Amino acid sequence: MIDTQLLRDDPEQVRESQRHRGESAEVVDAALRADAVRRAAITSFETLRAEQNAFGRRVATAPKEDKPALVARAQELAGRVKAAQAEASAAADEFERIVGTIENIVLPGVPAGGEDAFTTLREVGELPSFPFEPLDHLALGERLGAIDMERGAKVAGSRFYFLTGVGARLELALMNLALQRAVEAGLTPMITPTLVRPEIMAGTGFLGQHADEIYHLDGDDLYLTGTSEVALAGYHQGEILDLARGPLRYAGWSTCYRREAGSGGRDTRGIIRVHQFHKLEMFSFVDPADAVAEHERMLAMQERMLNDLGLAYRVIDTAAGDLGSSAARKFDLEAWVPTQGRYRELTSTSNCTTYQARRLRIRFRPEVEGGDGATQPVATLNGTLATTRWLVAILETHQRADGSVVVPEVLRPLLGLDLLEPLA
RNA sequence: GGAGACGUCGCAUAGUCCGGUCGAGUGCACCACCCUGCUAAGGUGGAGAACCCUCACGGGUUCCGAGGGUUCAAAUCCCUCCGUCUCCGCCA
């Protein structure tokens, strides 16, 4: 949810942001009208209620014989209060409904426009070239005894898979590398619930645009999370955080579940787009003044991972129209996938500024001279430090003519292998 | 799954039976000032959140786990939900 103060003080900034995203600017005016209605309704309700409260005190202290008459008048007043209250709360709901559809204000510098309007910030690493015809990650994975899609489908359906043998070990090594780096950077490791209540799912904003992407357990009314971001964002819901000693930084390790409802037919081969995978997700709660720096910090950690894994990648500044509703800016890191001859998104990092925190009511008390200031929403940021999909780029990039795969140096101690070799 | 107890303003608690003077007392912690050479102790005062009105001073409304209901009036009575704890049963 956006800042309603900003909506009132500078609606043009909000309209501009909506236009950058290719979203409606008219909702801004609808929201302003709803705000006026709401405030008028609240004021008249509160005036009546104040009257009722004062009257109630008179009834309480009145001599017994006067009470019946007073109560009769109070009854009449109570009816009017009830009506005014219903009106005020309906007006408040309507305002929230409309404001809720306004997406986060995009940060300056974010390219306006749709998916293709992104800016490439940099390309890093040399594109791999092969003196032989490279195999794709699935062909490699099958030869290495690392990936079994067929039995995944037998057991769970399409887009499910088994990681087997060195495949399972490779994923764990990757996740452990990410976890190690996270701990070194001072993040608190977390293993999070992957089933969450509806309020949490709604609070993090995933029930809007992504609703049909999410698995729901009807019998228990719980949602399976598509990222530990959901649980981590919900972790401090409704709390007033102490940020005096710096940001609260977490690294959530979880299995992620996605229905991939709208992606029929795309990336059907291999483990690029699957219903279930693992992810190590960074999540920070920071003073909004530090949000941009925190975003850079996450990006740097992600780049270091990709670099150290020997992957060629580019960093793009995602266009406004391609941002989620909560994100004010998002960097995607896309690794080169040799057999596809293009960059594919491996990871991203989003700065949600105060948008997500406002909806989740996560606040802090800024330090101001002369004591504590009023509470205000924190900024939240998230970024992925490793996921199963990374195996695609790792396998393909480091393959050799004989179908073996050289293990990146940083993974060797964690994996216990220097080379993955095809099964006989 | 069955039976029961409980959920109050940072923490701990009082208040709930018998609805009104309880938005709420007390202790600890906290902040400011005073006092004592320092420390400890002591004194005085302050201090929750959200929203509305106001240039401001200030005023008002809401919040006692959440949501409904009864009532002129609910922390207090009723219902539903969530959570915690205890006992019994069952099971990885």
Image (cartoon, coloured by chain):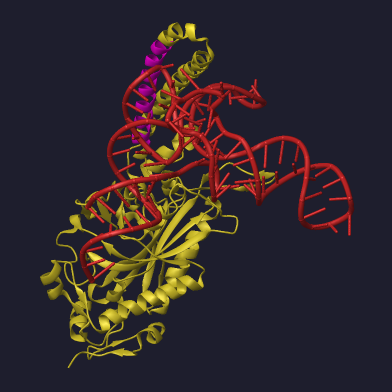
**What tint does the image give chain B?**
red
Above or below residue B42? Residue A255 is below
Residue A107, horizontal then vertical, whole percent: 45, 49
Left or right: A397, with B75 as reference point: left
Q: What are the residue bounds of the magenta stretch?
A: A74-99
Q: Where is the C terminus of chain A found, in terms of image quarters? A: bottom left
- Compared with A50, A417 (above or below) is below
In the rendered image, is residue A318 in sight? no
Q: As displayed, is residue A220 above or below residue A275?
A: above
Which SS type dominates the magenta stretch? helix
Image coordinates for residue A167, horizontal then vertical, percent: 26, 80
Q: Colour of chain A?
A: yellow
Q: Is residue B61 left or right of residue A411?
A: right
Q: Quadrant of residue A138?
A: bottom left
Q: Nearer the viewer, residue A71 or A264?
A: A71
Residue at x 41% of width, y 73% of height: A178
